[in-house]
Amino acid sequence: MVLLLRIMGLLAPAAIAVRVAFVPAIQAALGLPGETERLILENLLSGLVGAGLAALLASIWIAFRLRRLAVAAERMATGEYGLRLKEPRERLERQLVVAINTLGAALSDTHSAATTDELTGVANRQVLLPEVFNEVERANRYGRPLSVALVDIDHFKSVNDTYGHKAGDLVLRRVATLLRQNIRATDTAGRYGGEEFMLLLPETDVEEASRLAEKLRLLVMREKVRIDGRQEIGVTISIGVAGGPGKQVRFDTIVRDADAAMCSAKNLGRNQTYIFAEPDEDSRVPRAPVSVEGRARAVAIGRVAREAAQRVIEGVVEPLPHYRGRPSKMLAEVASRMAEQLALPEAEIDRIRVASLLHDVGKVAIPEEILEKPAPLTTVEWQSVVQHPRIGQLILEQAGALRDAAPIILHHHERFGGHGYPYGLRGQDIPLGARIVAVADAYDAMMHDRPYKAAIGHARAVAELRRHAGTQFDPELVKLFCDLFGAGVPGFDEAHAAQPAATRAARRRSRRTDAAIG
């Protein structure tokens, strides 16, 4: 269109030239001696001059306005996705500006989604690795130092298991914010994966990088993360640093070395910074691999330690006359079978088995008069009862070999729909092991006589589990339980039927239901 207007603009000088040079000749050739005919010809030529000038001016104005839009589009094409143009009054141009602004916003969102970790707001792994490659190339080309630091949140799995995944997300976001806000503008912080972050530090040797890492470690250690509006938790980080001067840095080794240093920091006690160094005769090896045989022996000894600790706790609580949390091997068998059916790792299955055996160990701290009270509990008494998952967690944390089972014990009275205790977690925020134990424990409770209610039998117990699926219990786990034990749980009915009627009656008089005591 602009080209057409410019061509039309050429009519102006052409018409003027014709008017000056050729009008008299044309008038004589056409035999137009009269004044009227001459005026008609001049008016025609003047009209052509005006139209040409108008087209020329229009082409200049349109080109000027379009150039602004073209420059904006070029800037967006080079990565200025946040650019926004002011909307003009002219309708057609405003439509173009709105379209360009909308396109820029869409490109900005797409670029952000592709390069930024959605949860933490820092660069993602897809951005980090190419950046490391580019910085390594630059360091080698110009002989400049470069360092990389890998940051891992200590005991992050325990945070998720104890407080839920929402709390874990809050911790990740807070740590990412601290890292991003306390590095230089030339540095890059990104999420490398899971609870690991990477710091890319150009123009930085390992000593300077370690000082920065220590500053960040102390900042995180002093920070408290508020997870439920009231409760605050603290976390620590372990950091591994690797790097070197230009000509010595390699892309395929710098990240590996930083990871080895980070593993050393964790193995040496966590909450510290470790600088990678090549092993030699005068320095300790930064990362010593464990042989298959050595690992197998360590696991076997650890299993013996767990079993010994478990037997000690069982031996302490079993003789207590009023203790209501005696281990149930049948309950443990049910929970273990469900965990196996979910194809969980062997270590996780063992953790669930231990937790199901000792899930009510915290009741050892509840006064006997509350456990044996034959009437409804008061508010104060109920507050004492609901502490038993937390007390159980503390007991197992003191028994180091069993501490992995503590989060399951802590949360086995949470409800799938919320409104459980001690933290009111809901749905998938409740650890899987705790959800499994909750189903097995409820079945165990319904299959035994209680003070306010006799055992209700297998069919009714299964019906109750189904009735409360989705509110109290994980519906998928209730379905799994019914698939595995729809015809009955081996040992449960037989064990209950073997009890004399007098014994069952005595238990009805002396025990409260689990529903009454949580």
Image (cartoon, helix red, strand yellow):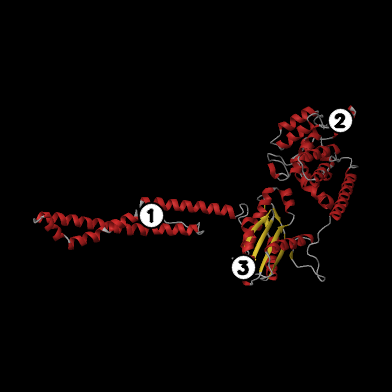
Above or below for 440 versus 49: above
User: Where does the image place residue 460, in percent across and percent down from the top left?
Assistant: 77, 28
**From mark 3 to mark 1, how far is it between C-alphas?**
44 Å
Name which residue lies at 54% across and 52% down: 109
Find residue 295 and report its horizontal and vertical position in percent.
84, 54
Position of residue 504 measured from the top left corner of the image (x, y, whole percent): 87, 30
- Mark pair 1, 2: CA separation: 84 Å
| C-alpha span from label 2 to label 3 | 75 Å
The kind of residue on which mark 2 rests is His
Q: Nearer the viewer, residue 28 or 431?
A: 28
Instruction: Decide which of tag 3 and tag 1 comes sooner along the chain.
Output: 1
Q: Crowding at label 3, few (<14), some or many (≥20) Cα neighbours within 10 Å?
A: some
Report helix, strand or loop for mark 2: helix
Q: Label 1: few (<14), some or many (≥20) within 10 Å? A: few
Task: State the SS at label 1.
Answer: loop
> Could you tell whether 308 is left or right of 430 in the image?
right
- In the rendered structure, the answer to whether residue 25 lies left or right of residue 181 reads left
Q: Which mark is residue 88?
A: 1
Q: Amino acid at mark 1?
A: Pro
Q: Amino acid at mark 3?
A: Arg
Q: Name the residue tied to disc 3.
A: 138
What mark, if any, has residue 1 been given in the picture?
none
Residues 301 and 410: in front is: 301
| Vertical order, 461 against 287 (above or below) | above
**Residue 404 versus residue 226: which sits nearer the camera?**
404
Q: Tell me the crowding category of disc 2: few under 14, some 14 to 19, or many 20 or more residues within 10 angstroms, Cα based.
A: some
The residue at which mark 2 appears reads as 496
**Residue displayed at 32% across by 57% down:** 59
In the figure, is residue 505 to the left or right of 201? right
Residue at the outermost front position: 29
Task: Judge by depth and name the residue closer to the eye, 80 or 339.
Answer: 80
